[in-house]
Image (tube, coloured by chain):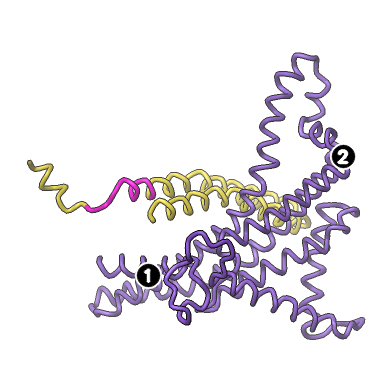
Chain colours: A yellow, B purple
Amino acid sequence: MAAAQVTQGVTGSLNTIGAGLAYGLAAIGPGIGIGIVGGKALEAMARQPEMSGRIQTTMFIGIAFTEALALLGFVLALILNR
Amino acid sequence: MQGLTERVAELLHELANLPAFASLSGAEAVPAGSPWVFSNYIFWMIIAAVLTAIFFMIAARKVRLVPAGVSNIAEAGVEFVRNMCVDVMGEQGLKYFPYVATLFFFILFNNLIGLIPGFKPGTGTIGVTATLALMTWVVFVWVGFRKNGFFGYMKSLIPAGVREMGLAGRIGLGAYIFLLEFFSTFIIRPLTLAVRLFANMYAGHIIIGIFAAFVALSWSNFTVGGGLVGLVSLVMTILMYAFEVFVAFIQAYVFAILTAVYIGSSLHASEH
């Protein structure tokens, strides 16, 4: 009875919960991944400043790859919420 | 938070594929099943394409030894893309440099146009980005087949060390790696190209819109706490706008350089 009273005002659906979970879980891996890529790029640039241009370019490519996965999750969350 | 839900729903409706000139034709949504869809995103994509063409026609008008004005910017951009192409693809890559440069500037103009309030980025719909990714896919698959032959290209997906193993190794490990590489090269690459660009543009607009919705919401019925929330949201809107300009450049650059990397890997496939 108490449970029924508590859930009376709930209007969401499992889709919404799924959407939140989808993006939340999808952002963990790429977050760590981008941090690692950025950190390694920083280390490399500090070791050899004359290679900064090359390293920065490769860093951007690496970030784009991992960011795509997080954004896949974001788009899925939006689709689920429709 | 009733007002917020309504505003977010309105924001998502704004960002959806509506028929262009909807206010004139009175259409509410894109009619289902119609193959030629002239939506608001396509309208702005055409505007951006025309702008790119005009930009480069003006820049190419007077070719001087020391460029000035529009020619200067255009030459700086083209040289940047050219250096990137030579870096990634080698000298033979210069044959594909016009395609990569067109891709870069088309996507850049589309992304930047979308930042003007009321305008939409042409690349903010999956149809446009999927078409660009499909074009890149056709180019690098075609180059792979042309340069290495059909079987040569397929064989190059298996690394050289595996190809030299005994029969059991080649069948077991080779087949497994071939399956993975096939999936990664022919399916994942164009898919992620399309989704990366689309998601970046779409999500960027949603983030700006949500912060703006927060500002409107907390400043419409004014309380002291609400005023502070609105102020922070306003600052965040401006910051996200600056970030979106950065993202516009980065995403155009990433699409172009990934295209160059894929074409380069097709060109050099036999050297693995």
Query: Looking at numbered disc 2 in the image, what kind of residue is underneath it?
Result: Asn
Residue A12 position (above or below residue B17): above
Q: Which residues are magenta?
A: A11-19
N-term-proximal mark, 1 vs 2: 1
In which chain is the residue bearing label 2? Answer: B
Indicate which disc residue B10 carries. 1
Q: Is residue A18 magenta?
A: yes
Query: Looking at numbered disc 1 in the image, what kind of residue is underneath it?
Result: Glu
The secondary structure that dominates the magenta segment is: helix
Q: What secondary structure is found at the residue carrying circle 2?
A: helix
Q: Quadrant of the N terminus of chain B?
A: bottom left
Q: Residue furthest left?
A: A1
Residue B181 position (above or below residue B193): above
Which residue sits at x=58%, y=53%? B195
- In the displayed structure image, the side of residue B207 where residue B94 appears, left or right: right
- In the displayed structure image, the side of residue B135 where residue A9 appears, left or right: left
Indicate which disc residue B260 carries. none
Q: Is residue B241 magenta?
A: no
Tell me the crowding category of disc 1: few under 14, some 14 to 19, or many 20 or more residues within 10 angstroms, Cα based: few
In which chain is the residue bearing label 1? Answer: B
Which residue sits at x=57%, y=51%? A68
Q: Which residue matches tag 2?
A: B148
| Residue A41 point in image, percent of width and height | 66, 51
Q: What secondary structure is found at the residue carrying circle 1?
A: helix
